[in-house]
Image: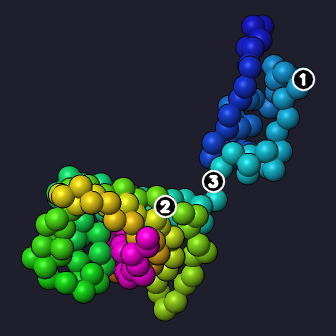
Amino acid sequence: MIIPKFNQIKLTLLSLSSLVILLGTSGNWMPKSFSLSPKTLAQNVPDRTTLEQQKAAEVIRHYYDAINRKDYKSAYADWAGRGAASGQSFEDFKKGFANTASVRVNIGQPGIINGAVGSLYIEIPVTITATTVNRKIQRFAGSYTLKRINDVPGSTPEQRRWHLYSAKITSVS
């Protein structure tokens, strides 16, 4: 019997029963230093909360990437209610970036996900550096609150996606 050599084994989202099927019932081929425990498996699999925090942060990244590409329709759509949560019409939203040459965002550690009446909310801190068309640097800091609808019967995929819900952004020196 040929025994495979392993330098490193990474298991991701593999149930113990699947592992037994893959390894066979004897598992005699496993290296002596290899150990498998629920704790080891859990350390290699991000939990649902972490994945949801990452998805929410990705909306902020997408928002600023869209602004940099001058794709204001896409950026506007990142706001809840098809842009309505921005508090502006699309035309006013677009005009608000008329003097923006580029923008860079640094995303802080996402907060705890909170639930309320069928929805989830998360607050994520940001620092923003914008450059105007006249090359003036502007700095901002604050946070965005993002919202998504829970996975409930009748909810649409669009509703179950994270959206910008509100912003607390102020100019900093």
Percent position (x, y) of residue 136? 27, 60
Residue at screen point 82% across, 39% down: 36
User: CA separation, marks 2 and 3?
Assistant: 19 Å
Which numbered disc flags the more N-terminal residue, 3 or 1?
A: 1
- The residue that disc 2 covers is 107
Name the mark nearer the viewer: 3 or 1. 3
Magenta span of residues: 156-173
Disc 3 packing (10 Å; few <14; some 14–19; many ≥20): few
Which numbered disc flags the more N-terminal residue, 2 or 1?
A: 1
Q: Which of 152/46 is in front?
A: 46
For the C terminus, the quadrant is bottom left
Disc 2 packing (10 Å; few <14; some 14–19; many ≥20): some
User: CA separation, marks 3 and 1?
Assistant: 27 Å
Name the mark nearer the viewer: 2 or 3. 2
Q: Quadrant of residue 170?
A: bottom left
Which amino acid, mark 3? Pro
Q: Label for residue 98?
A: none
Q: Quadrant of residue 83?
A: bottom left
Residue 45 in sight:
yes
Q: Label for residue 32?
A: 1
Helix, strand or loop under label 2: strand
Residue 173's place in the image compared with 31, above or below, is below
Pick out the residue farthest to the right. 32
- The residue that disc 3 covers is 46
Which numbered disc flags the more N-terminal residue, 2 or 3?
A: 3
Disc 1 packing (10 Å; few <14; some 14–19; many ≥20): few
Relative to 149, 65 lies left or right: left
Which amino acid, mark 1? Lys
Name the mark nearer the viewer: 2 or 1. 2
Q: Which of 110/158 is in front?
A: 110
